[in-house]
Amino acid sequence: MGDAEALGASPPSQSIKEQWLWPSQQPSLGATMTPPASKSSSKGLEGIVAAQSSICFIDGDKGILSYRGYDINELAPNATFEEVVYLLWHGHLPNREELEGLRAKLAANRELPPVALKVLKDVAASMGPMDALRTTVSALGAGRNDADKYTVEIDMQKAVETTAQLATIVAYYHRLRMGKPLVHPDGKLSHAANFLYMLNGEKPTPAAERAFDVALVLHADHDLNASTFSARVTAATLADYHGAITSAVGTLKGPLHGGANIEVMKMLLEIEASHVDPEDWIKHQLAKKRKIAGFGHRVYKTLDPRAVHLAKLSKSLGEQAKNTQWYEMSLKLQKAMKAEKGIDANVDFFSASSYYVMGIPLDLYTPIFAVSRVAGWSAHVLEQHGDNRLIRPLSDYTGELGKKWTAITKRSPPQLEAKAKA
Ligand code: COA
């Protein structure tokens, strides 16, 4: 049995190749009337400023990322996840008392409410981890008498509970599907250590705890990324906090967003299994116009600053585990991608090899992204509710106008209609 199978991962599949191919657009059947000229539009909202926010700053050209004014290079080596959560939600670093207060609240809220635990138990065997997470996060809102309220205090309380419980959902999900007994949270452990403890059933070494904590710090927020934007769009309708977080989890799943870290590890395993030189593999994929998971970014036009820290993590974890092959292969791919296409690694690239040597099953990489990003989603929901305006953009209509009603008996199949016009 290979390493991947031993970890419960599905074997490398054709899916990497297939998933980056898009269906072509349907051709228009011909306009009967021209729609008015559009004001301005940007496919994928590229370059559009859609909110004012004081949470996260990114300079994509210079590769700068900061949370509440603190550069990620300051935070990664120094901060714990709990400190970053406090920073994102309150706008300043906590003093000792404030930090202890948040730690105690998170620790006290780790156990799942009975309805959510029941839902998780019901779906664990039949749903993938992100789907089970989305469904169970939604159930966290069940039975609350403050479900539809969104004052700062209520949102903050929901944020504390959900941040604590989202980690529990992921760990419990894994234990349930493996048929193993649940490991209940240990209130004395940090968020990072407690998650690894609930997942594996043993307390992590200080090095593993710190490595995981750094990964959580690096993933905690990223401005208006797709899942955060989803959360804000939902929150802006004055829907409830849990609805917003559920939207975000649904959005994070996709391979163009949080799901990319799984694809990266599948790619590394596929290269290993096929004994191909990583550089040749990249050239071959690019020649076929395929996208390489873990590279490129909508905002960064240079190296993602998080990738720098995750590369260090991947290296040191590999050295500790006496297995640096995945780190080394990643470096070769990174170099080849830069040389061939001028594209840099993103956050998902080195997180894959880091989690792999930590023994985390592949399909939990994206749920772990959510374990961290819930901090940012919550900060954005709080900010949105604090100064709300419905988010409702326009589309640039490319269809037809002015068509006349046709009785059903006189409608021909679209293909015939198109042929008749040709
Ligand atoms: N592999 C190969 N080429 C890539 C690429 C990748 N990962 N990412 C971007 N490119 C290329 C595109 O092919 C395109 O090249 P072209 O102009 O020669 O056609 C150019 O770079 C622009 O790409 P585009 O897809 O338009 O950029 P985008 O801003 O829409 O995409 C991503 C951003 C993240 C969706 C895209 O880089 C991607 O799909 N990356 C892989 C998935 C991933 O790692 N996602 C996690 C992001 S944190």
Image (cartoon, rainbow, N blue to C red):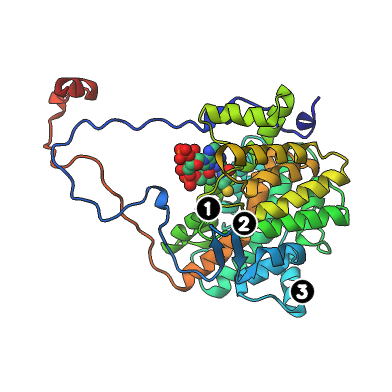
Q: What residue lies at 48% left-to-right and 30% top-to-bottom?
A: 21
Q: Quadrant of residue 161?
A: bottom right
Q: Is residue 97 left or right of residue 121?
A: right
> If you read the primary sequence from the N terminus, does the residue marked by circle 3 or circle 2 appear first?
3
Type of the residue with mark 1: Ser
Q: Earlier in the sequence, mark 1 or mark 2?
A: 1
Q: Are marks 1 and 2 in contact (CB under 8 Å)?
A: yes
139 shown above or below 176: below
User: For mark 3, what is the residue?
Assistant: 100
Tell me how far mark 1 sits from mark 2, CA to CA.
9 Å
Residue at which label 1 appears: 227
Q: Which residue is mark 2?
A: 373
Q: Is residue 25 visible?
A: yes
How far across and down, in percent of the image, does residue 162 sit? 63, 60
Instruction: Find numbered disc 1 in the image and state the secondary structure of the residue it sits on.
Output: helix
Q: The residue under label 3 is which amino acid type?
A: Glu
> Image height check: is 321 above or below 204?
above
Q: Residue 144, can we see it?
A: no
Density class for disc 2 (Cα within 10 Å; few <14, some 14-19, many ≥20) is: many
In the rendered image, the quadrant that contains the N terminus is top right
Binning the other alpha carbons within 10 Å of mark 1 as few (below 14), some (14 to 19) or many (20 upward) gives: many
Amino acid residing under circle 2: Arg
